[in-house]
Amino acid sequence: MRNFDELSEREVLALAIANEEEDGRIYLDFSEGLRDTYPASAKVFTEMAAEEGDHRRMLLDLYRVKFGEHIPLIRRQDVRGFISPPSLWQMKVLRLEAVRNQAEQMEIEAARFYRQAAARSTDASIRKLLGDLAEAEVAHEHTAERLMEENLPQSVREQEDEAARRLFVLRFIQPGLAGLMDGSVSTLAPVFAAAFATGQSWDAFLVGMAASIGAGISMGFAEALSDNGSLTGRGAPWIRGIICGLMTTLGGIGHTLPFLIHNFLTATIVAIVVVFAELGLITWIRWKYMDTPPLSAALQIGFGGALVFATGILIGAS
């Protein structure tokens, strides 16, 4: 990589042309990725790509006048100081807010680049164009805001944000919540049955670990194989499977770890406290993301957990 202050004016213009071309293509990729789910935002990025194309043509015209037809291949990854943006365009499903944030960062970096390039240029025409482009990039931030206002009135913006929230819930919260509920509730019976049947903390711990890990593997495969996401829009099945499997395992391990305590009574009391904490967390997630009234969520989760807990104690004590 080279330092920016080592570049000649020819190389600075070549870098500017490459940057404008890359930014325009990224905006078009954003537009294509958002078109089906967020058509209004897709239109915004199409228009932003068109403006990047105008900037590139201005730079090309000046470059031909000053340096001829051949443009050396210089890219931002060849020069120190540029921020490497996350490759959102490679994602199968784009997150709307992440795309908007990256576009804003790209415009800020472009304006900074043109200001620095103009400041060190000794050619009057190059200095003028670079300064004009710096102002244009600053104005582009306002243009993006204007395009957002024109194409994304408050009602449409709210609809797209709500759609993004629903997709987040479907792809991440729902499989995680299903796993956490299954791991926290279904493992109660074997863990406490083993605890009360043997009266030994270590035996309860081994049963709890086996039940938690086994349930995690089972739930992970069940989630991944149940829906490939092509019709429901729930995203990549392997991602949902991993999330569900991990949360299932964590839900069971939570009230299993206390049985590492050697004293059986202390271990049991701590495990019961952890169970209440797990059920409280599940209730909060259902209220926060699933729009379930908190009292209703607490009663539903508490009733199910109490049944499984009682089953484990009755079987273990019999």
Image (cartoon, rainbow, N blue to C red):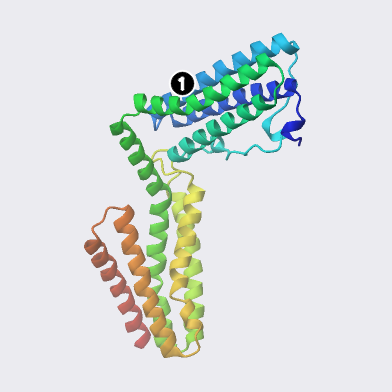
Task: Tell me where residue 135 appears, x and y as whole percent.
Answer: 53, 23
Q: Is residue 71 visible?
A: yes
Instruction: Identify which residue is drawn at 34% across, 68% down.
Output: 279
Residue 74 in the image, given as x and y percentages of width and height: 72, 27
Question: Residue 14: percent from the left, percent from the top?
Answer: 70, 21
Vertical arrangement, residue 271 with respect to residue 100, above or below? below
To which quarter of the image does residue 302 belong? Answer: bottom left
CA neighbours of label 1 inside 10 A, class few (<14), some (14 to 19), many (20+): some
Count of marks placed on residues: 1
User: Is residue 215 among what the camera can see?
Assistant: no
Q: Which residue is mark 1?
A: 47
Left or right position of 30 against 167: right
Residue 194 in picture, x, y percent from top left = 43, 82
Q: Quadrant of the N terminus?
A: top right
Residue 68, relative to residue 18: is it above or below? above
Residue, x 47% and y 82% (percent of image)?
Answer: 259
The residue under the point 53% across, 36% down is 105
Which image quarter is the C terminus in? bottom left
* Position of residue 50 in the picture relative to residue 122 (left or right): left
Q: Secondary structure at mark 1?
A: helix
Q: Is residue 6 above or below residue 13?
A: below
Closest to the observer: 276 or 183? 276
Instruction: Identify the residue at horizontal 33%, vertical 41% (top origin).
Output: 162
Q: Nearer the viewer, residue 164 or 21?
A: 21
Q: Amino acid at mark 1?
A: Glu
* For residue 297, side relative to residue 82 (left or right): left
